[in-house]
Image (tube, grey):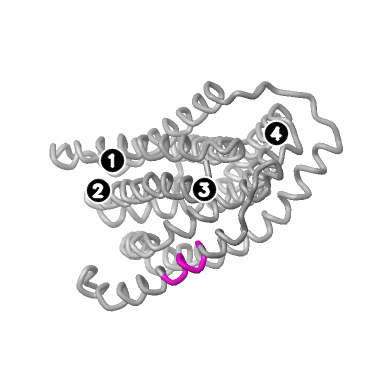
């Protein structure tokens, strides 16, 4: 499949996935109120930051080494599970220390053990979903990954839509737990699909020091750049929560979600380019890529100007 065909096929699923995710956020705002949505937004920001810090760029390394064939699938799987268990152990330690010092847990703010448990389960779902998406991308199974993510988000949207139109009132904690459960469900679907449909050996393999060095020497560079980028556009969540509280954060986070619509095309392009460029066995037409980037940049510039003028009518303050 050439790049143009691949791009055209996947942009549909990626676009639908963005719409489904936005629909979920709108429904959660209605069901939980701005305070509840602010709590979820803060939880997602906290978990994303922790995952970013503790995984050390493993997902990007998985895509690169999987696509370049520089490391076997079994060794990659062994390394990412080692990173996964390290993340869980580190989280428990951080949460226990934080609770001892402040009286509440961090990922899901609250003093009870249920908050600790929800934070652990949510991290488990997020990090497993990220790692298995990376594994599928490393094997050039982009469409499969995007289909799974979209259909799982569609199921989640349908569940919350049922509660909204059925007027089945629950407290915000219930919807928070339901949201976490859907994230776990998505991770399980990605995990099963990878092990069921990949044609290569996917069992655990013994790793040695050169494998570890090769894997993490690449991931560490990605880790530093991702950390800087993440803090640059997410530090506002913590500042707003600290000074204005969860209700204001919920309103602000919804506005941010609207702005992120424009990211769908460049994110899709970058996610497809990365494994294709890393795979030396495939022919990669750089001229076609440059033409696509010029067209994409021009399109986004036009869209940005249009959005600037119509946004006040769509999103009243």
Q: Are marks 4 and 2 in contact (CB under 8 Å)?
A: no
Task: Name the element at disc 4.
Answer: helix
* x and y percentages locating residue 26 in the rendered image: 26, 52
Task: State how far apart marks 2 and 3 are (Cα).
Answer: 21 Å
Task: State how far apart marks 4 and 2 are (Cα).
Answer: 38 Å
Q: Which residue is mark 1?
A: 157
Instruction: Residue at 32%, 53% (x, y): give it.
Output: 37
Q: Nearer the viewer, mark 3 or mark 4?
A: 4
> Does 293 appear in magenta?
yes
* x and y percentages locating residue 213 in the rendered image: 82, 43
Q: Which mark is residue 76?
A: 4
Instruction: Residue at 72%, 37% (x, y): give it.
Output: 69
Q: Earlier in the sequence, mark 4 or mark 1?
A: 4
- Write the start and end of the magenta stretch as one range: 292-298
Q: Which residue is mark 2?
A: 27
Q: Earlier in the sequence, mark 4 or mark 2?
A: 2
* x and y percentages locating residue 239 in the rendered image: 47, 68
Q: Residue 269 versus residue 208: which sits nearer the camera?
A: 269
Q: Nearer the viewer, mark 4 or mark 1?
A: 4
Q: Residues within 10 Å of mark 4 (few under 14, many from 20)?
A: many
Residue 227 placement: quadrant: bottom right
């Amino acid at each position: 499949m050439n790049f143009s065909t691949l791009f055209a096929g996947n942009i549909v699923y990626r676009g639908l996935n963005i719409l489904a995710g936005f629909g979920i956020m709108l429904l959660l705002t209605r069901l939980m109120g701005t305070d509840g949505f602010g709590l979820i937004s803060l939880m997602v920001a906290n978990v994303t930051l922790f995952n970013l810090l503790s995984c050390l760029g493993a997902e990007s390394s998985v895509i690169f080494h999987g696509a370049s064939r520089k490391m076997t699938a079994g060794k990659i799987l062994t390394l990412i599970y080692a990173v996964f268990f390290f993340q869980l152990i580190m989280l428990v330690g951080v949460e226990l220390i934080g609770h001892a010092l402040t009286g509440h847990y961090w990922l899901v703010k609250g003093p009870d053990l249920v908050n600790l448990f929800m934070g652990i389960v949510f991290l488990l779902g997020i990090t497993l979903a990220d790692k298995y998406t990376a594994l599928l991308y490393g094997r050039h199974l982009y469409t499969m990954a995007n289909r799974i993510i979209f259909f799982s988000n569609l199921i989640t949207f349908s569940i919350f839509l049922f509660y909204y139109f059925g007027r089945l009132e629950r407290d915000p904690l219930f919807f928070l737990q339901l949201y976490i459960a859907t994230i776990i469900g998505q991770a399980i679907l990605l995990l099963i699909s990878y092990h069921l449909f990949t044609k290569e050996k996917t069992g655990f393999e013994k790793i040695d020091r050169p494998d570890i060095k090769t894997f993490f020497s690449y991931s560490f560079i990605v880790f530093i750049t991702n950390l800087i980028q993440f803090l640059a556009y997410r530090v506002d969540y913590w500042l707003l929560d600290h000074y204005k509280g969860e209700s204001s954060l919920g309103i602000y986070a919804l506005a941010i979600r609207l702005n992120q619509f424009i990211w769908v095309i460049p994110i899709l392009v970058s996610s497809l380019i990365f494994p294709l460029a890393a795979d030396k066995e495939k022919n990669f037409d750089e001229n076609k890529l440059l033409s696509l980037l010029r067209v994409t940049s021009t399109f986004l510039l036009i869209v940005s100007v249009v959005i600037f003028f119509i946004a006040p009518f769509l999103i009243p303050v």
